[in-house]
Amino acid sequence: MTGQLIEDLQRLFQTCEERDGLRYNGIRLNRPDSGGFKVDWKGQYGMITVRVLFFATIRALIGKKEMLVELPSGSSVRELKLEIARKFPHTDQTVKTMLASVNQIFSDDDTQLADQAVVAFFPQVSGG
């Protein structure tokens, strides 16, 4: 599907004559002043935005307290972890073992995320 979408968009860009943008299968294409197109995927392909909070060692590794991440609708905590590991490859091993809280409820990796969810990540802890 992704390959077909890219081919369709390339064909569309080549034949587009409208100057203020257009719609293609529900995707809004806006032509900014600089020339190219800006694509708004969110509506058509069901993207969600998740607010991610980092604590303790994961915060130190990433160097951020929080960030917004866009994911396809239906994504789980596992997919969010994969996206974070993709953006910050040096955190790969730590990200895999992080504990997650979704909207202030501890959650496992299979928990599905909703649009505007707040996900907090904590490193595994042990103690006596």
Image: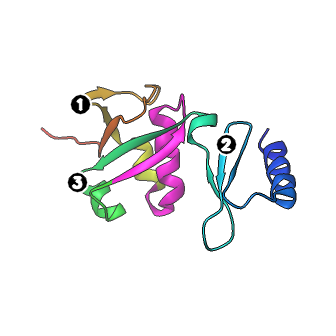
Determine which of the numbered discs, if any, sits on residue 56 in the image: 3
Mark sitting earlier along the chain (3/1): 3
- Along the horizontal axis of the image, is 14 left or right of 62? right
Mark sitting earlier along the chain (3/2): 2
Q: Amino acid at mark 3?
A: Ala
Q: CA distance from mark 1 to mark 2?
A: 34 Å
Look at mark 2 in the image and give the residue it sits on.
27
Query: Label 3: few (<14), some or many (≥20) within 10 Å?
Result: few
Q: CA distance from mark 3 to mark 1?
A: 17 Å
Q: Which residues are magenta?
A: 67-91
- Residue shown at 54%/28% (left/top)? 74
Quarter of the picture holding the C terminus: top left
Q: Amino acid at mark 1?
A: Gln
- Residue 126 colored in magenta in the image: no
Quarter of the picture holding the N terminus: top right
Mark sitting earlier along the chain (1/2): 2
Query: Label 2: few (<14), some or many (≥20) within 10 Å?
Result: some
* Residue 80 point in image, percent of width and height: 47, 41
Look at mark 1 in the image and give the residue it sits on.
104
- Along the horizontal axis of the image, is 52 left or right of 30? left
In this rendering, the answer to whether 71 lies above or below 7 is above
